[in-house]
Image (spheres, rainbow, N blue to C red):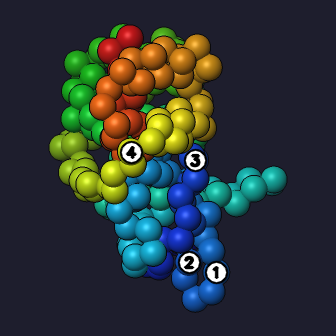
Amino acid sequence: MYEYIIGKLTEIHPAYIVLENNGVGYQIAAGNPYQYSSQVNQQVKIFVHQVIREDAHTLYGFNTLEEKNLFLRLISVSGIGPKSGLAIMANEDHEGLITAIESSNINFLTKFPGVGKKTAQQLILDLQGKLGEAPATKQNTGQSFLENPALEEAMEALQALGYTEKEVKKSYKSLKEEEAMTTDEYLRKALKIMMKK
């Protein structure tokens, strides 16, 4: 099992990044791939968790060991698969997530894609009192895009996380009125909008 990979970040896609190490490009699923925009063609360290299934070997990537451990806690809950866990991790309000679990806030938890009332109750049952402090998130400034391909990329990333087309369109309407931002900033803002619905 891999703990982390250090390599050159070569590509960013809506659902994953590509990290090159010794001539091999590793496809690593990430909650918000665009947070790495400012690090393209630079050496980065990504903590990874590998999930092996009959039809796929998938690497899931995180900025810190704490984030990876939170993800592992989430996917240990019945009803939360790696894709749902990644969608939950994409929202950087990890403190809000932990608070929601500790305070049995089902409404907050059901705002995540793939999390219904039953799964939210299971999250609370399995993780209450076991999560401790929220992991610190690494802030990336990202480069500035003046066109709206950045917004389109952010919307594609939302769909890759499992949000419905209707939910994506709703956040698109809110964000297209904003001043131009990076894909990372659009995606962060879109995820905040999703949590308010």
Q: Is residue 149 visible?
A: yes
The residue shown at (47%, 58%) is: 61
Tag 4 residue: 146
Between discs 2 and 3, the one toward the N terminus: 3
The amino acid at mark 2 is: Glu
Dot 3 falls on a residue whose secondary structure is loop
Image quarter of residue 161: top right
Residue nearest the viewer, comparing 86 with 146: 146
86 to 45, vertically: above or below: above
Task: Tell us which disc is closer to us: 4 or 3.
Answer: 4
> Alpha-carbon neighbours of circle 4 within 10 Å: few (<14), some, or many (≥20)?
few
- Give percent across and percent down for residue 135: 24, 49
Tag 2 residue: 20
CB under 8 Å between discs 2 and 3: no
The amino acid at mark 4 is: Leu
Dot 2 falls on a residue whose secondary structure is strand
Image quarter of residue 163: top right
Tag 3 residue: 15
Task: Tell us which disc is closer to us: 2 or 4.
Answer: 4
